[in-house]
Image (cartoon, rainbow, N blue to C red):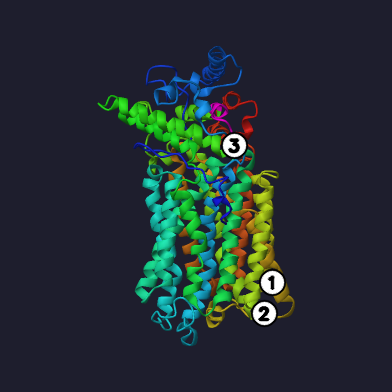
Amino acid sequence: MVAFLSPASAVVGAVCLGGGSPDSRCGRRPPCGGRGGLFGRRVATRAATAAATATAASRQTATTMATGSDTPNADAADPRLQASGGGGGGSADNDAPPPSRFPLWLPAFVTAAAGGLLFGYDIGSVSGVVRVLSSPATAAAGAGSPFGSLTSLGALSAAQLGAVASASLAGALASSAAMFRYGDDLGRRKEMALAGAAYLTGTALQAAAPSVGVLLAGRLVYGLGIGLAMHAGPLYIAETAPARLRGLLVSAKEAAIVAGILGGYLAGAAFQPDWRTIFAVAAAVEVPFAASAALGWVPETPRWLLLRAAALEGGQAGQPDAAGTAERVAALRAAAVSAVAKLEGLAPADAHPRVDAMATAVADTCLDASGRVARASISSLYADPASQAALAVGLGCVVLQQITGQPSVLYYANQLFEAAGFGFAAAVGLGAWKLLVTGVAAAYADKAGRRPLLLVGTAGMTVALVALAAGFWGVDGGGAAAAAAGGGAATLTGARQTVVLGSILLYVGAYQLGFGPVTWLLLSELFPLRVRSAAISTGVLVNFGTNFVVTAAFESGRQTLGSGGLFAVFAALCGASVAFVAAKVPETKGLSLEEIEAQLQGESGADERQALMGDDGRRER
């Protein structure tokens, strides 16, 4: 987890300057002279293509005349960077650091994925902690550990145990809701730094809690970190990963969550009954995660920097400090060029065309009629065709992944494996199986594509749910029979048990192949730049909310319909999911974020925009 701390990748990131309302793509190269040309409204793509070509030729000519060399010198030919201190007195490139031999998109991914791993660790570890705190014989544990001198909390009541298990969810919901309004103001890297701080604070409170109240406060603060990390992570990865690897990396973040769950199970087994140490182990990942984001060891996303520049310029037009604003806009644009160069291991001169393409997308899609970047709102999510199409697909997948029974099947998995005598080995084995299949999904997301993975995954879930319904049919019968069974799983023997256990493994594998990783991948790439942060926040809220509803309604549904009837309902919903994916979900593999937006809008200029992004535009960010 700390590989990205090596000197080769410890690069100071761009400093976020100025105010305004950002998102994620941005920055078109301005004409020489005049403020109004930097982020023009709806620039024609043919004209932009010609301008980009002419700018490159002009830079090459100017460099040759000034130096007698054909080597590009971006700063010498770029009056914007001269105005902000980059030019004059010789070649700026001679003073600039050489391009990184190790592109920073990988350390950037590791940093964002660490936030997901810590979320998964909480899921896996809290089950072991609750088991310890539920027993008077183990709740007093702690002697001989670093926390042995702390007061024992004793065995907790059922209500207290429920609060310990669910308090982090409440914190995650709160921070996710806050990011709808403030996510674009913070930026992706700062949000991850805040997540790291919340993780560390929550872990300290949990591990050293002298009372149940402090323990619950720690759980709540840790949950704030979960919400921040789950919001910022997909955004950061999508906006820093090469298009050809975006599916792999965003899906691999889901693998990091699963790895965290497995790590939590293992820590619970290794340190039981010392529940304080189980919590404290998370600091081994939290420290490098927080430091990498807070200290700038990885850069801010270039799209966010450029959109912030656009917001700054639009919001300050005509104000007395216009000159100061122009300097800050130039600095943000230079930071975006630097970020692209570091992320891809390029020379600054080679990063300019990438930034130009991102800038044109911001000018085309993010500015209103007055030249300002409009702040995202609930209404703006429904205001244009691209947002509407993305909402239907993205949030549809979020809802379907929950109402097709994922929380309920996992509940039965734990119950059934324990009843079969596997106990802890079952939890570890199931976690390893999930990690293996998620790794396969991540590896093939950019090869097979999003749609095939979703179609195969949802079809496999449907088959598994039909088999589960058959295996449970008539066992508890619903109504009084199911109520009499209480909260435990129905008793299964012989062939039924074999069918059900095999079906659970098929269901979990199919879920991790499709809905598990691909839903978050689609959320990170489908929404237009101007509403992407707010849309991810909405997706996180809907995910946690529907998970809560399904979990809360599970037991009453089981008692009413019986386990077999409940799984039959889930199977029908999963069959509908197959039809939804086939009819609604677009294929986005290999496309840049800008091309995906053009596809959702149904614009005919996608080919022209691709030409602006370079000869191999589908491999640009």
Task: Compare residues 21 and 398 and report the one nearer the observer.
Answer: 21
* Residue at 65% over, 56% down: 438
Rendering coords of residue 44 (x, y %): 50, 20
Q: Badge 1, how many Cα within 10 Å: few under 14, some, many 20+?
A: some
Quarter of the image that includes the N terminus: bottom right
Task: Compare residues 547 and 580 and report the one nearer the observer.
Answer: 547
The disc at residue 501 is 1
Amino acid type, residue under disc 2 in the picture: Ala
User: Is residue 41 at all visible to an observer of this figure?
Assistant: no
Question: Over which residues does the magenta segment extend?
Answer: 345-353
Question: Which SS does the magenta portion mostly show?
Answer: helix
- Mark pair 1, 2: CA separation: 10 Å
Q: Which badge, 2 or 3, is on the more N-terminal residue?
A: 3
Task: Compare residues 38 and 142 and report the one nearer the observer.
Answer: 142
Q: Disc 3 designates what residue?
A: 345
User: Is residue 424 at all visible to an observer of this figure?
Assistant: yes
**SS at circle 3:** loop
Q: Which badge, 1 or 2, is on the more N-terminal residue?
A: 2
Left or right, 571 with respect to 92, comes to right
Work out whether 326 lies above or below 553: above
**SS at circle 1:** helix
Work out whether 390 lies above or below 54: below
Q: Which badge, 1 or 3, is on the more N-terminal residue?
A: 3
Task: Compare residues 293 and 252 and report the one nearer the observer.
Answer: 293
Left or right, 381 with respect to 58, comes to left
Amino acid type, residue under disc 3 in the picture: Gly
Please identify the residue farthest to the left as the structure is shown.
320
Amino acid type, residue under disc 1 in the picture: Leu
Image marks 1 and 2: residues in contact by CB distance under 8 Å: yes
**SS at circle 2:** loop
* Disc 1 versus disc 3: nearer the observer: 3
Q: Disc 2 designates what residue?
A: 420
